[in-house]
Image (cartoon, rainbow, N blue to C red):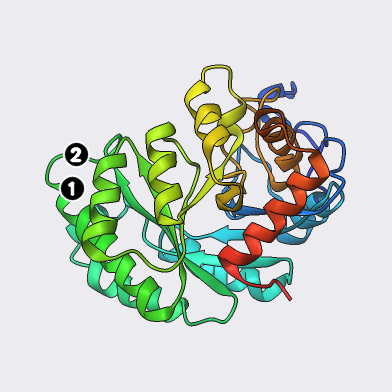
Amino acid sequence: MCNSLAPAPYRAPSGETDSRKEYPPAPEALPVPVMDNHTHLDFRHGLIEVSVKDAMDSAEAVGVQGAVQVGCDLESSRFTVQAVDADPRLLGAVAIHPNDAPVYAGRGELESALAEIEELAAHPRIRAIGETGLDFFRTHGDGLVAQRYSFRRHIDIAKRLGLTLQIHDRDAHDDVVQVLMEEGAPERVVFHCFSGDEELARICNRNGWYMSFAGTMTFKNAGNLRSALAIAEPDRILVETDSPFLTPHPHRGRPNASYMVPYTVRSMAEVTGDDLAELCSRLAENTLHAYGSWA
């Protein structure tokens, strides 16, 4: 693994630098520390590999003092448990991703996978079940049966263990809300990488669900996200990277990491009209309410 997160570039096989694979420069540090409440430290872009410590050191240097490492299958959920043991700046979430649920089901392994997720979730620094939910963009047809079943089972696990539920919702807003209502939502629900509009934001406001905004809200074509943020209850908003994906403007398309959170927070402040330091304090407080203490 390399010794630093940025700006060490990936070198294309020809020996030429591929700028699309370079980590962007670090932003100006935030005036008050916040947390990245959704990252995938085990996912890599290109040939770049970064240790958990290096990633969190780079984040801490710009005012991102902690993160929630998120599992999407058994392998990444096992990694998550190892990561939270290795670095106290991390909490964790474990789950079978909606698009992976049909794969496990097709192999006859979904029940055993869910059982292991529940075992992993017993770790004291695992604070959420996720990401789970519905994805109508990549999963279709018979696969949706397993996806819906898996979502309901994850809700049950979160409720029985008293953990936060991290929602993956892609092109499935109405159905996600319907399942949450039918099953009875856990006490704390986070819509990871919030992708809805004002209508979904109002539903979240009414139900006390958190809306987590990622780099997508900085994109030029994301007026719906900025409109949703503008009406979101101040105590219901969070910030995330979903790194290494969804790198905020002006570095869209390049690898993302927790140290990029300040770009998104500053864009959020422009939408809400908040003083930057006050917004940072609110985001940090909301994150602690959603997941508990990092200490």
Local secondary structure at mark 1: helix
x then y, percent, for residue 189: 44, 59
The residue tagged 1 is 143
SS at badge 2: loop
Residue 65 drawn at (x, y percent): 78, 58
* Left or right side of 156 for 42: right
Q: Position of residue 125 (x, y in %)?
A: 60, 76
State the residue position of label 2.
140
**Quarter of the image containing the C terminus?**
bottom right
Q: Which residue is pictured at 62% across the width and 27% down the height?
A: 218
Q: Is residue 108 above or below residue 19?
A: below
Q: Residues within 10 Å of mark 2 (few under 14, many from 20)?
A: few
The image shows a total of numbered marks equal to 2
Q: Residue at x 27, y 74 (%)?
A: 112
Q: Tell me the kind of residue under disc 2.
A: His
Depth check, front residue: 182 or 43: 182
Say whether residue 99 is visible. Answer: no
